[in-house]
């Protein structure tokens, strides 16, 4: 059982009583994590102003819940829980952050997707943002296994937080989009290397929302005119621990396109047509492959958008996500 610490000190609550809690198993807020954020990176914990001004009234914030410890490194997740006086079990959106697998943290993306986060909470969905070991700490498949272990933790503790993990969605941006697509496409038959404990239960995945994530790590190398594959410092090489060109077998094993099947859940994919970091062809390929296997998939092309553009959180695209979520929840 996870025991949460006392409610943190608060400024006057302008938004009507939103509170922030810190798990007593977490570390101090704002500390730089080894292999993680840079000096200019957003803090891995949401500040009170964000909670008070960006989230719905009554949202409960439980931060830095440790879900796994590896070699003395604590991996943590944050929960945003909407007002829930009846104590019913709520559907869950699990968010995996981006950052080229080498940076970022569980709070950063929420600053760029504050409108989507707020609207999901207004829909009475629990929102969980997780962290994983970055490429300076571990290489594939360890970060994937971290994410799967976070899902297992949520399922084990579903009653503690009133989570309905049989109505779960995975969402993520960039490297996080890759991870949600990788886990999501293989979810109903996860390979052994993705799983720490084959006996652990993860719940039921209803759908995946992928914002401009890489889908094929071998194909991704094609965007580079010249590659020193013996000294490959690309993000995907750091993630894999090898250049995709020297270990194409490993790159394929770490690519969502390798796991698409008729058993994959529905996908909603967003990509900007001016993305030069992760070419839109990555999402075109994933979307086409899903459809060829009879899986419901929709690719939303965001015109004029570059990688990580703020416009991905515009109302029109939020509406696409909410329609996707609502349509799948109605089937349950």
Image (cartoon, grey):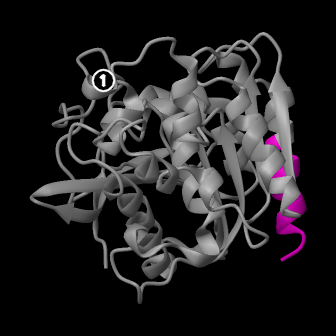
Q: Position of residue 27 (x, y in %)?
A: 17, 48
Residue 86's place in the image compared with 251, above or below, is below
The residue depicted at 37 percent of the width and 48 percent of the height is: 131
Q: Which residue is mark 1?
A: 233
The reply to whether the magenta stretch includes residue 311 is: no
Q: Nearer the viewer, residue 260 or 72?
A: 260
Q: Is residue 133 above or below residue 226?
A: below
| Magenta stretch holds residue 326 | yes
Mark 1, Cα crowd under 10 Å, few <14 / some 14-19 / many 20+, is some
Looking at the image, residue 16 sits to the left or right of residue 249; the answer is right
> In which quadrant of the rendered view does residue 309 lie?
top right
Residue nearest the viewer, comparing 109 with 82: 109
Instruction: Identify which residue, 230 or 264, lies in the foreground.
Output: 230
Q: Is residue 123 left or right of residue 105?
A: right
Residue 261 place in picture, x, y as percent = 73, 67
Determine if residue 155 is in view.
Answer: yes
Percent across and percent down for residue 243 are: 35, 35
- Give the percent coordinates (x, y) of residue 289: 79, 51
What main secondary structure does the magenta stretch of the protein show? helix
Q: Which residues are magenta?
A: 321-332
Image: 140 above or below 312: below
> Is residue 82 shown to the viewer in this render?
no
Q: Looking at the figure, which quarter contains the C terminus?
A: bottom right
Q: Is residue 190 left or right of residue 241?
A: right
- 5 lies left or right of 165: left
């Amino acid at each position: 059982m996870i025991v949460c610490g006392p409610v943190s000190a608060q400024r006057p609550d302008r938004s009507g009583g939103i509170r922030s809690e810190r798990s007593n198993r977490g570390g101090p807020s704002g500390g730089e994590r080894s292999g993680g954020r840079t000096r200019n990176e957003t803090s891995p914990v949401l500040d009170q102003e964000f909670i008070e001004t960006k989230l719905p009234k009554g949202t409960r914030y439980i931060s830095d819940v440790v879900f796994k410890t590896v070699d003395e490194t604590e991996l943590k997740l944050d929960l945003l829980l909407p007002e829930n006086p009846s104590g019913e079990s709520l559907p869950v959106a699990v968010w995996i952050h981006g950052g080229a697998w080498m940076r970022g943290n569980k709070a950063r993306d929420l600053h760029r997707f504050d409108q989507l986060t707020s609207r999901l909470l207004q829909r009475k969905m629990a929102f969980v943002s997780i962290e994983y070991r970055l490429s300076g700490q571990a290489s594939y498949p360890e970060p994937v296994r971290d994410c799967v272990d976070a899902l297992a933790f949520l399922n084990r503790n579903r009653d503690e937080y009133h989570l309905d993990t049989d109505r779960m969605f995975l969402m993520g941006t960039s490297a996080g989009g890759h991870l949600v697509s990788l886990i999501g496409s293989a979810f109903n038959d996860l390979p052994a290397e993705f799983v720490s404990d084959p006996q652990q239960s993860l719940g039921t995945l209803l759908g995946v929302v992928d914002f401009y994530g890489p889908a094929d790590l071998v194909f991704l190398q094609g965007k580079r005119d010249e590659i020193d594959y013996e000294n490959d410092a690309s993000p995907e090489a750091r993630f894999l621990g090898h250049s995709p060109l020297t270990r194409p077998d490993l790159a394929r094993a770490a690519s969502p396109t390798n796991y698409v099947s008729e058993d994959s859940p529905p996908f909603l994919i967003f990509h900007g047509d001016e993305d030069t970091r992760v070419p839109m062809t990555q999402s075109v390929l994933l979307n086409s492959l899903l459809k060829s296997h009879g899986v419901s998939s929709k690719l939303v092309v965001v015109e004029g958008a570059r990688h990580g553009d703020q416009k991905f959180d515009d109302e029109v695209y939020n509406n696409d996500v909410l329609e996707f979520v609502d349509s799948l929840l109605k089937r349950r």
